């Protein structure tokens, strides 16, 4: 896993389309702190079915196996392969924000 990027998956939402088909939508955060869509290719889903996120987490992706599609109104990160998945460490940090 020498040349991998750690990508933060911040949203995992089950969506039902108007025709009744269900799919999962993913969002990530880029280095500027802006959300962008995250999508997995069919090959990725076939090869890495057990690594596809079901909840927010970090995924490690080989640099050569991901690209950003900028031909759309909003960019989309396409992932072709997932090397590993790392869960979030969730902590209750209300003490930092409130007295």
Image: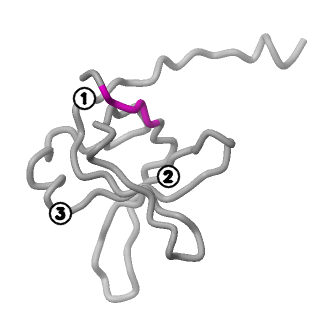
Residue situated in front as seen by the camera: 29 or 49: 29
Tell me which segment is drawn in magenta.
3-7
Image quarter for residue 53?
A: top left
Whole-number angstrom distance, CA of label 1 to CA of label 2: 18 Å
Say which mark, if any, is on residue 42.
Answer: 3
Q: Secondary structure at mark 1?
A: strand
Q: Residue at x 38, y 54 (%)?
A: 67
Question: N-terminal of the two: label 2 or label 3?
Answer: 2
Residue designated by label 1: 84
- Residue denoted by label 2: 27
Q: Quick one: which residue is furthest to the right in this view?
A: 99
Relative to 76, residue 28 above or below = above
Instruction: Nearest to the eye among marks 1 and 2: give it.
Output: 1
Instruction: Say left or right for 84 vs 94.
Output: left
* Residue 4 counted in the magenta span: yes
Report x, y in % for residue 24.
35, 60
Q: Quadrant of residue 59?
A: top left
Residue 11 against residue 25 in the figure, above or below: above
- Pick the residue in front: 1 or 8: 1
Q: Quadrant for residue 83, please give it.
A: top left
SS class, disc 2: strand
User: Where residue 11 sits in the image (x, y, percent)?
Assistant: 49, 47
Query: Would you say 56 lies left or right of 78 here?
Result: right
* Circles 1 and 3 in contact, beta carbons < 8 Å: no
Q: How many marks?
A: 3
């Amino acid at each position: 896993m020498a040349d991998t990027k750690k990508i933060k998956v911040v949203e995992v939402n089950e969506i039902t389309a108007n025709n009744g088909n269900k799919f999962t939508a993913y969002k990530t955060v880029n280095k500027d702190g802006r959300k962008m869509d995250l999508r997995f290719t069919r090959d990725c889903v076939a090869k890495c079915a057990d690594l596809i996120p079901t909840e927010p987490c970090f995924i490690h992706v080989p640099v050569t196996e991901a690209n950003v599609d900028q031909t759309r109104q909003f960019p989309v990160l396409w992932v072709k392969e997932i090397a590993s998945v790392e869960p979030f460490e969730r902590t209750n940090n209300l003490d930092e924000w409130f007295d």
